Amino acid sequence: MSTKEIIGRGTWIDKVAHELIEREKKLGRSLDLIRTESGLGASGIPHVGSMADAVRAYAVSLALKDMGYNSETIAFSDDLDGLRKIPEGLPKELENYLLWPVSLIPDPYGCHESYGKHMSSLLLEALDKAGIEYTHKSAYEVYKSGKMVNEIHEILLNWRRVGQIIYEETEQDKFLRTLPYFAICKRCGRIYTTEAYEYDPNGKKVKYRCVGAEIRGKWHEGCGYEGWAYIYKADGKLSWKSEFAARWRMLDIRFEAYGKDIADSVRVNDRISKEILKFEPPYHVRYEMFLDTSGRKVSKSRGNVFTPQLWYRYGAPESLILFLLKRFTGTRKVSFNTVVQMMRELDMHKDVYFGRLKIENPLKRERMKGLLEYSYRLGEIPDIKVPYDLVLSLAEVAPEGKETEFITTRLKKYGYNVDSKEISDIITYAINWVKDFGPTPEREREIELDNTTITALKDLIKEIRGLSDGEEIQGKIFTVARRHRISPRKFFKTLYQIIIGRDRGPRMGPLIADIGVERVIQQIEKIIANKEQPK
């Protein structure tokens, strides 16, 4: 297949952007501004999966801009949702605010206006650090301002038809009897315990009673209060099964991805958007969930979250973006080891981008280059030639308290220019990893070893054991390669792959001496053992 058949930069992002434009042209809608949207949860500590929505929406906006269109990403915080469960690790005092809208709950840490603002800020800070550009919208502020009143009004005027759509798509019959609106009880402050049963279109207000609700298998008794909620204030909110449609039309959203866990809600909202609000819903892509190492869904309430802030302690923001953009289909497991693997992949993508690693398949090559470009937000890509794995190896043997000086000195000795923020950051990531976890995880890259090379590696182990002089070790490598009639270039390439995960690097002898002969021998023996295991 030729590069002429490659769309844009060869990624799924470019394909989505092109399909989106073709769809909009067929619909005859204005292309002056194309908005993509991401929903941001505000009920718990945001994790890597929470950030994925915004990164993917922004990537599609970048692709649209690359095609010559004006595009904007909306990051919409769902901060009028009620707190259904206290997330693991948060103060038990929050039990007093169960089912309260998160924007009306005091910040337990005392640094923001509310619990919802605190949680939203964590994700927004992570996006800012990654260079993701967005316009932030708060559900609480949108409802409070009355900007969505027309959409709410139309949905409530047609609440019976909305309830029928919900029932047809999900078999949930609740909204056949009640309006798809949750008022905030003026007496007890809770939102999900109320039931809306009448709409006054002239006063634009909803009558409700606080009757109670079953949440996560537990019944919460209502306080019995009856009153009115005004839809042009933050007196309440639409249910999820109609709110997406309202904000899509209000903001003129053309693209939004979604996870399989809310597929029913998206399907319902698509119909409400078309049939009730007469607005063609956004172009969607559906993605799978993020799992922890035990295979459980990453969840804010469960407490098994892996936050962007944790990732940034051990890896560059670009490595996280690359992880989130690699693909959107299939479930993804995320752990601390994932950060190291993605830093290695970032290096590999740069090797392809700058021509150090040849990929024969043009589609794969362009896709890898395109993903790297999107990981750097279509900006300048720094050609950092210092391998992350090399820095990790040096961090493991660096003297405590002098890690940065030790690593910097060795890199200079190997001929690397270390005077850049990027290299300084890499050194910090590596030191943090080794301090917190010790030895680095094994590489996933397959190393090709034939029987002759395995025999030569075993011979090399005997030759270098007990040595400490880098030049003497360098000489032994040449000697062993010639003894076994292996090209020295090929033999050195194999050693580089084993030790730092790349095809080339600094002089091998001094590198082995700095890392430690015994440690290198252990790496070689582990590779050999894996190759010699019966299949």
Image (tube, rainbow, N blue to C red):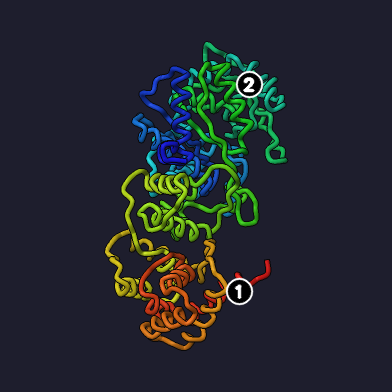
- Amino acid carrying label 1: it is Ala
Looking at the image, the residue that sits furthest to the bottom is 466
For residue 323, the mark is none
Q: Residue under circle 1?
A: 529
Q: Where residue 426 appears, x then y in whole percent?
A: 38, 62
Task: Reply above or below: 275 against 526.
Answer: above
Dot 2: within a 10 Å radius of its alpha carbon, few (fewer than 14), some, or many (20 or more) residues? many
Q: Residue at x 67, y 25 (%)?
A: 169
Does residue 126 appear in this view?
no
| Local crowd size for mark 1, using a 10 Å CA cut-off: few (<14), some (14–19), many (≥20) | few
Q: Position of residue 148 (x, y in %)?
A: 47, 23
Q: Position of residue 97 (x, y in %)?
A: 58, 42
Residue labelled with disc 2: 179
When the figure is inspected, residue 348 is found, relative to residue 526, above or below; the finding is above
Viewer-proximal residue among 213 and 7:
7
Q: Nearer the viewer, mark 2 or mark 1?
A: 1
Q: Is residue 192 above or below residue 279?
A: below
Residue at screen point 55% across, 27% down: 243
Location of the C terminus (image quadrant): bottom right
Q: Earlier in the sequence, mark 2 or mark 1?
A: 2
Gap in angstroms between the C-alphas marked 2 and 1: 66 Å
* Residue nearer the viewer, 462 or 309: 462
User: Quick one: which residue is furthest to the front in this view?
Assistant: 485
Callout 1 secondary element: helix
| Amino acid type shown at disc 2 | Leu
Question: SS for tag 2?
Answer: loop
